[in-house]
Amino acid sequence: MARIAASAPFTPDRNVPGLIVKFGDYPLHHGGVGAIRSLGRLGVPMYAITEDRYTPAAASRHLTGAFPWPTTGTEEPERLVEGLLRVGRRIGRPAVLIPTDEEAAVLIAEHQDELSGERTGFGGFLFPRVEAELPRRLASKQGLHGLCVEHGIASPDATFPESPSDVAEFASRARFPVVAKNREAFTRRKSPAVHGTTRIETPGGLLALARDWGERPGVILQEYLPREEAEDWIVHAYFDANCVPRAMFTGVKVRSWPPHAGMTSNAYVVDNPELADLATRFIKQIGFTGIIDLDLRFDRRDGQYKLLDFNPRMGAQFRLFENESEIDVVRAMHLDLTGRVVPEGDQRAGHRYVVENIDLPALLAYRRSGYTTPHAPARASGTELAWLAADDMKPFFTMLARFVRPGVKHLYQLWRTRRRGSTAAM
């Protein structure tokens, strides 16, 4: 049985379960475990789609039931929708959907009628209703850049080459270094042009990398914002059906893995009203509802926050953020969708979040580079670990068992891939 947090100043609807929805093979996902714990500790029945029965999420004592369903993220949408409906029928009652990747968030948005209708056989799923095309556009680097331009939100200068000649023309005039990223979010559907965010030092380096991009380069070439002149910020929030923020949080990213461009491994809660206002204004303009996870970089050269990534879903590090009423974005969504009041409160400024299995290599890499993070508090007011929890130990040990050998090899391969990309670009 899940432990109920007796101290919580609110009562969720424990008749409405939550369902973690994930597509693709990434079993070591701490965000899903965090969501299971967050609602499970309140007595909400929690279910999860998992790669198999031996993932950290499946091992959580706060999980009511796991649905092993191996997917790649490349399946046809109709197959994924039917699979979700089968899961819903097995649960037997409406459940709040909690997507952990872009594929899941986009699928839910684009098939809202099928997933929410009474003809599902169990009453349909609960999720924020949003314009069907919007999550896909936000998850796309090109789509997000267009929305930023349209609504006056600062973002790095970018170009989207349509041919090798466009790349060559850009190389002849661009100021280096530049950054290359995959244009679309769903790189699992085909071989990605680049592996993550790739810094390119010279025109020759760009042309060398572009030889593998084919006749239609699927990349965005973006202005490089120097780490020495920038600060990495995070915004997590939940917006209701009227685009009103029911939970709003801001923080500073201290480290990520791979370094400076990957998943957050260490972060702090830092109050930033200006950034919260910017995010609220943008969400109101585009009409988004639901949970958001934004990455922004403050460019000290011109004093602007530049939007880098918009994840239209829960971020893996969402448990960094909780307010004085013990509300995080997942709890806010569940309360709102079940007709409950979402308690307000100030965020826990100074709180820290650490992802144990990737923060050590990130720490070593950052120390080697000499980079330090502005605005990170000298001392944390409290620390939340991604995996280790006194009331739920099995996910931590399951993570270790799956991570140690293949995980170390994977971290090394990531580092080598990024190092080769940087070396080839010099």
Image: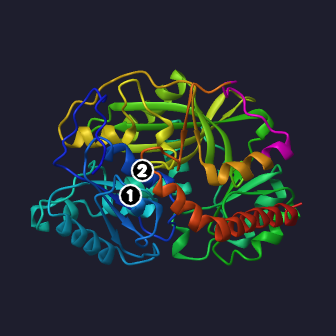
**Badge 1, how many Cα within 10 Å: few under 14, some, many 20+?**
many
- Asked if the residues shown at circle 1 and circle 2 are in contact, with their CB atoms under 8 angstroms apart, the answer is yes
Q: Where is 9 relative to 333, above or below?
A: above
User: Which residue occupies 65% across, 71% down?
Assistant: 406
Q: Is residue 369 magenta?
A: yes
Picture quarter with the C terminus: bottom right
Region in magenta? 366-378
At numbered mark 1, what does the secondary structure look like: helix, strand or loop?
helix
Q: Is residue 18 visible?
A: yes
Q: Which mark is residue 313?
A: 2
Q: How many marks?
A: 2
Where residue 297 appears, as percent x and y from the top left, is 65, 38
In the displayed structure, does residue 27 sit left or right of residue 94? Answer: right
Residue sitting at 48 percent across and 48 percent down? 315
Quadrant in which residue 237 is drawn: top left
Is 204 or 367 nearer to us in this picture? 367
Between residue 417 and residue 356, name the one nearer to us: 356
Question: What's the distance in space between the residues labelled 1 and 2, CA to CA?
Answer: 6 Å
Side of 148 where 323 appears, left or right: left
- The three-letter code of the residue at mark 2 reads Arg
Q: Is residue 62 above or below residue 326?
A: below
Vertical arrangement, residue 95 with respect to residue 325, above or below: below
The residue lying at 67 percent from left, 28 percent from top is 376
Q: In front here: 256 or 239? A: 256
> What amino acid type should be assigned to the residue bearing mark 1?
Ala
Residue 105: image tag: 1
Q: Secondary structure at mark 2?
A: loop
